[in-house]
């Protein structure tokens, strides 16, 4: 029998078009501005990186990635960022270990120091990405300016527009933002239909993504050998094994995070913790090689250009060193995000699986390794699945990724997260 209509859950009312239309112009403006700020910081950091890791060591007659130069540069980066955190008004925001991808609006006085600390970090070589500080800066700017220019609009809306715009700009597509927003809204009691709630943020994400695409032409496709034909039972087995193993490796860093952060916190002052963290990162760079430095996107592309160029042990060694560098950089106070270095760790782990078992396709190894690692580090299921899929651009692998995500998610759900409360205790 059909269920009684009166007992069905009521459908949330849809917002009229006249309520959504006023969101379009603010969303477009926020999207364009958020993308331009991201691109500006990235370009400035890349120019400084070229000077610090190219022109300067060449002028001094020192090898660009010699052990000496890595130790000097990463320690000096810790000193520079430590000075910003110590002396610049706002101290570059709160302890980054307590922040996730979503950001509460920060006071305007904090934002210049946060931008400067992020740019210095990106140029100097620590293993963090730009996402967390750039999202925080865009959210703070949009909230502060939006509340003054249009005080009738809710402040939370400006924050949602800026966050979606920045995610769209970072990945060059609004799809990533739509997935993150829908995941964030899933547990809330929505007023209206889902698409009414994501309408403005999706416009902002589209504007941010299109601006990034037109200006910088980014691509996440690693151009690995294509995964052709239909997947076999061996491919399914490989996916179901690699993703949970990568997630387990990521959880090692997650569970070590409170302890490593506690050690650096005991050092007390940013001018001690950050230079010491930089020195440790320099030692890790000397151990793992120059590919384990920086945010990791250019470096993972270099790995993907030659999947047969390293042994299984070398791939896994780089993955472990990079994960340790991510752990140290996130613990000692560098301002940055964890998604992009985690992509490198997962890709290196997946290529190690291919090198160990050649029957494992390199594209499948990379995608499932990245999926498992991101699930453990970020606990963002949709963004993990999306990132893993766009790296290999293979519709065939997508079905395997969906299945591989299940055991990996069972492994990570309910466990500690790589984010701390203000008192240093971990979140679950």
Image: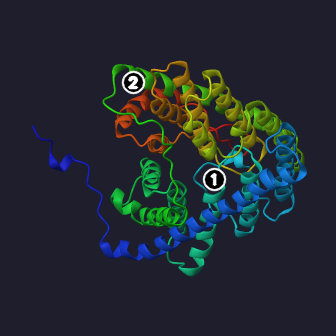
Question: Which quadrant: the N terminus?
Answer: top left
Identify the residue at the far bottom of this view. 149
* Foreground tag (2 vs 1): 2
Question: Which quadrant: the C terminus?
Answer: top right
Residue 121 screen position, x and y as percent? 75, 52
Separation of residues labelled 2 and 1 (CA atoms): 35 Å
The front one of 131 and 123 is 123
Residue 104 lies left or right of residue 370; in this view the side is right
Tell me: residue 356, above or below residue 421. Answer: above
The front one of 68 and 233 is 68
Q: Quadrant of residue 248?
A: top right
Q: Is residue 247 visible?
A: no
Q: Residue at x 61, y 33 (%)?
A: 416
- From the image, tell me which residue sits under label 1: 132
Tell me: residue 37, above or below residue 98. Answer: below
Q: Quadrant of residue 25?
A: bottom left
Q: Residue at x 26, y 55 (%)?
A: 11
CB under 8 Å between discs 2 and 1: no
Marks 2 and 1, the one that precedes in the sequence: 1
Residue 382 lies left or right of residue 127; in this view the side is left
- From the image, tell me which residue sits under label 2: 235
Color encoding of the figure: rainbow
């Amino acid at each position: 029998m059909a269920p009684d209509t009166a007992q069905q859950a009521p459908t949330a009312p849809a917002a009229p078009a006249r309520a959504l239309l006023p969101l379009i112009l603010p969303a477009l403006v926020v999207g364009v501005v958020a993308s331009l700020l991201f691109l500006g910081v990235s370009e400035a950091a890349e120019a400084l990186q070229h000077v610090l890791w190219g022109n300067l060591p060449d002028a001094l007659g020192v090898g660009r990635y010699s052990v000496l130069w890595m130790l000097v540069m990463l320690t000096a980066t810790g000193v520079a960022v430590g000075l910003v955190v110590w002396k610049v008004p706002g101290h570059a925001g709160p302890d980054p270990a307590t922040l996730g991808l979503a950001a509460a609006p920060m006071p305007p006085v904090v934002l210049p120091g946060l931008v400067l600390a992020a740019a210095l970090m990106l140029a100097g070589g620590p293993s963090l990405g730009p996402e967390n500080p750039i999202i925080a800066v865009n959210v703070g700017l949009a909230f502060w300016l939006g509340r003054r220019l249009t005080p009738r609009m809710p402040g939370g809306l400006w924050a949602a527009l800026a966050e979606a715009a920045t995610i769209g700009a970072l990945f060059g597509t609004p799809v990533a933002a739509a997935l993150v927003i829908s995941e964030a809204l899933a547990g809330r009691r929505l007023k209206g239909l889902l698409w009414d709630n994501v309408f403005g943020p999706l416009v902002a994400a589209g504007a941010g993504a299109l601006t990034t695409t037109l200006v910088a032409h980014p691509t996440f496709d690693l151009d690995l050998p294509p995964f052709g034909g239909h997947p076999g039972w061996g491919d399914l087995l490989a996916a179901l094994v690699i993703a949970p193993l990568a997630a387990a490796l990521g959880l090692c860093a997650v569970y070590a995070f409170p302890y490593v952060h506690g050690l650096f916190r005991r050092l007390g002052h940013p001018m001690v913790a950050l230079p010491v963290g930089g020195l440790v990162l320099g030692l890790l760079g000397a151990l793992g090689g120059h590919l384990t430095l920086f945010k990791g996107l250019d470096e993972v592309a270099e790995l993907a250009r030659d999947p047969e160029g390293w042994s299984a042990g070398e791939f896994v060694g780089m993955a472990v060193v990079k994960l340790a560098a991510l752990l140290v950089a996130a613990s000692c106070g560098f301002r940055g995000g964890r998604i992009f270095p985690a992509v490198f760790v997962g890709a290196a782990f997946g290529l190690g699986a291919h090198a160990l078992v050649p029957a494992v396709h390199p594209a499948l190894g990379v995608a499932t390794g990245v999926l498992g690692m991101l699930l453990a580090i970020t606990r963002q299921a949709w963004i993990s699945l999306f990132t893993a899929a766009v790296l290999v651009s293979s519709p065939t692998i997508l079905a395997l990724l969906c299945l591989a995500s299940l055991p990996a998610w069972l492994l990570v759900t309910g466990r500690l997260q790589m984010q701390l409360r203000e008192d240093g205790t971990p979140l679950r």
